[in-house]
Image: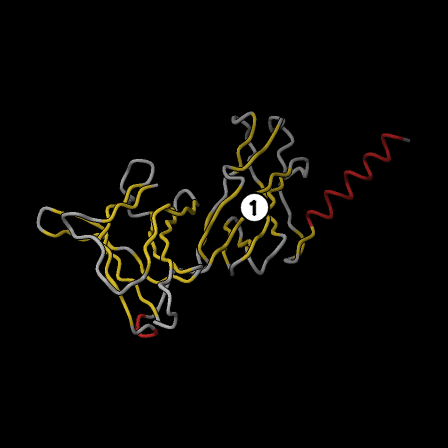
Amino acid sequence: MMRKTLFIIHFSLFMSIMLTSCGVVEFDVDSEAQPVLSMTLDHDTVYVMAGERFVLTPVFTPDTISNKAVFFVSDNDGVGMVDADTIVAVSPGWARISAVSVSGRFVATCDVCVFPRWQLTAYDYPDDMLVFASVSIDGREPDADIVVAALYGDEPRGIGRWQIFGRYRCMVFRIWDDGAMEEPRQIRFFYYDRKAFRLGMFPQWIAFDGETHGTPAKPVELKK
């Protein structure tokens, strides 16, 4: 009687997972597949900019199993939506993505933080200032997968661009402001690593004063 009850519970859980908003998900399960001992995801938390897409990869133990198929479910489609095996960052907020093995036996999760896109229209701001900066993250200059931006609060006010001035190379920010406050705004610098799904803030900041900060020869240091 106990074995029958456990079978019913397991079967009900498996069927509830199989039924999604898109209909019934069907899998061909290899009965000869090597038994799975555990399953995780290659990320447990990711930070991603709204509008971007990314893939989560399941990690099985043992890693030599023949059937590595999973399907994904989101607890908040308005933030992070599942599109086949791809996660779409829809709008700012938090979502939890669950990966379920084809047997329904293993579930792994990843928390997804979607933040607003770093984009701005310069014509909305009458005032600006320039910042010439040397930038390093963990002792290295950011590569093409890393975006560095100047923000006031959570509002982007400038995106860094690498430029070469003779024998000097630095990141240049044109930072914009509406001039509405009597006290200078505190501008902070953030970076977003698209490959590592990482979001971070530099400890250095600058008060918006409409002046030029740093030069190509003596840039402001942004170091994390």
Residue at horizontal 91%, vertical 31%? Answer: 1
Q: Is residue 176 left or right of residue 214?
A: right
Residue at horizontal 68%, vertical 48%? Answer: 18
- Element on which disc 1 rests: strand
- Residue 99: give x, y in percent of width and height: 59, 42
Q: Amino acid at mark 1?
A: Asp
- Residue 94: give x, y in percent of width and height: 57, 53
Q: Is residue 209 left or right of residue 110?
A: left
Q: Is residue 115 left or right of residue 67?
A: left
In this rendering, the answer to whether 175 lies above or below 38 is below
Q: Residues within 10 Å of mark 1 (few under 14, many from 20)?
A: some
Return the residue found at the far right.
1
Residue at horizontal 34%, vertical 74%? Answer: 124
In this rendering, the answer to whether 152 lies above or below 181 is above
Q: Residue under label 1, please give it.
A: 111
| Quadrant assignment, res 126 | bottom left
Residue situated in front as seen by the camera: 26 or 166: 166
- Residue 50: give x, y in percent of width and height: 46, 58
| Quadrant assignment, res 37 | top right
- Residue 109: give x, y in percent of width and height: 59, 41
Residue at horizontal 52%, vertical 43%? Answer: 45
Quadrant showing the C terminus:
top left
Return the residue found at the far left.
166
In this rendering, the answer to whether 179 lies above or below 24 is below
